[in-house]
Amino acid sequence: MNTGVGTKLAQNIIAQVQSAAETWTPQHVLAWALETFGNRVAISSAFGAEGMVVIDMASRLGKDFRLFTIDTEFLFPETYNLMDKIEERYGISIERVYSALSPEEQDKKQGMALWTRDPDLCCNLRKVEPLRRKLSELSAWITSIRRDQTSARAEAQRIEWDSKFGLAKINPIVDWSAKQVWRYIHDHEVPYNELHDQNYPSIGCTHCTRAIRPGEDPRAGRWSGFTKTECGLHIIGPAPLPAGE
Ligand code: SF4
């Protein structure tokens, strides 16, 4: 862990609360995380429906909180518009984290349109490496993953040790359904990405996201044509190193 709290101590803290936390409300989990880690914890979000719920809940706790996003520089205009709305509505400044390579530098180094040939490498360069850099500043990160989104997320706990990145990982709505997420959004009039109303249940980069057709899995529009279902941020185990790094 990258703070005054050593890894062992942090793992002990997590072990003490992990099973009790499974019965806590998402708001209780968030309050505990902010209280325990202060400014060494931040919400990570790509501003999907789930992320909007977590951001809204955190704002209602009345405590300062940090929010960052991995900006691949390939996001939809609707996503950038939503970021502006979030900053205005919640009075916060989103910390934007970029790849070490600009899109043009990536084209030069790896060839044009890497995402069509090797999306894992592209995600490593544009998402995983920047995330690793950001998380090295923190003691804990807050995500909005849900267990039923992908098989890689099925075993996630509300509060857990992230062995891939070496810090605490807080998943306040891990046991929620998509229905609960949307009920919260409507009940609290939370802003959301307009693309959700155009059959985009899961939204990432423009190059790798399409609208889904009736009856398709909600994540079928991500990396369509590849077996890939995750960008690598929530998969346990060492990430493959970007080529040449
Ligand atoms: S989602 Fe696609 S374009 Fe975005 S970083 Fe991953 S492979 Fe590259």
Image (tube, helix red, strand yellow):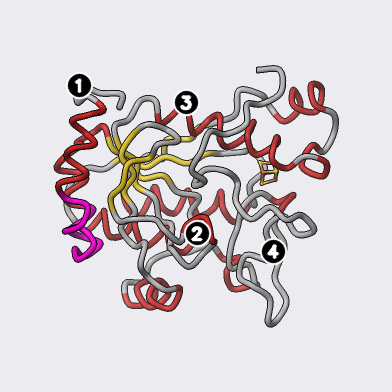
Q: Which residue sits at x=32%, y=41%?
A: 161
Label 2 packing within 10 angstroms: few (<14), some (14-19), many (20+)? many
Q: Amino acid at mark 4?
A: Gly
Q: Which residue is mark 1?
A: 4
Q: CA distance from mark 1 to mark 4?
A: 42 Å
Looking at the picture, how far across and down is residue 61, in whole percent?
18, 55
Contact? badges 3 and 4 (CB < 8 Å): no
Q: Which residue is mark 2?
A: 48
Q: Amino acid at mark 1?
A: Gly
Q: Which residue sits at x=45%, y=35%?
A: 164
Label 1 packing within 10 angstroms: few (<14), some (14-19), many (20+)? few
Label 4 packing within 10 angstroms: few (<14), some (14-19), many (20+)? many
Contact? badges 2 and 1 (CB < 8 Å): no
Q: Amino acid at mark 2?
A: Gly
Q: CA distance from mark 3 to mark 4?
A: 28 Å
Q: Main secondary structure of the magenta part?
A: helix
Contact? badges 3 and 2 (CB < 8 Å): no
Whether the residue carrying mark 4 lies under 8 Å from ligand 1 is answered with: no
Residue 155 relative to residue 139: left or right: right
- Earlier sequence position, callout 2 versus callout 1: 1
Q: CA distance from mark 4 to mark 2?
A: 14 Å
Looking at the picture, how far across and down is residue 208, in whole percent?
72, 52
Q: Which residue is mark 3?
A: 133
Q: Which residue is mark 4?
A: 221
SS at mark 1 in the image: loop
Contact? badges 4 and 2 (CB < 8 Å): no
Q: Report which quarter residue 136 is drawn in.
A: top left
Q: CA distance from mark 3 to mark 2?
A: 22 Å
Which quarter of the rendering shows the N terminus? Answer: top left
Q: Which residue sits at x=24%, y=33%?
A: 39
Nearer-the-camera pick, 133 or 243: 243
| Magenta segment boundaries in residue numbering | 17-30
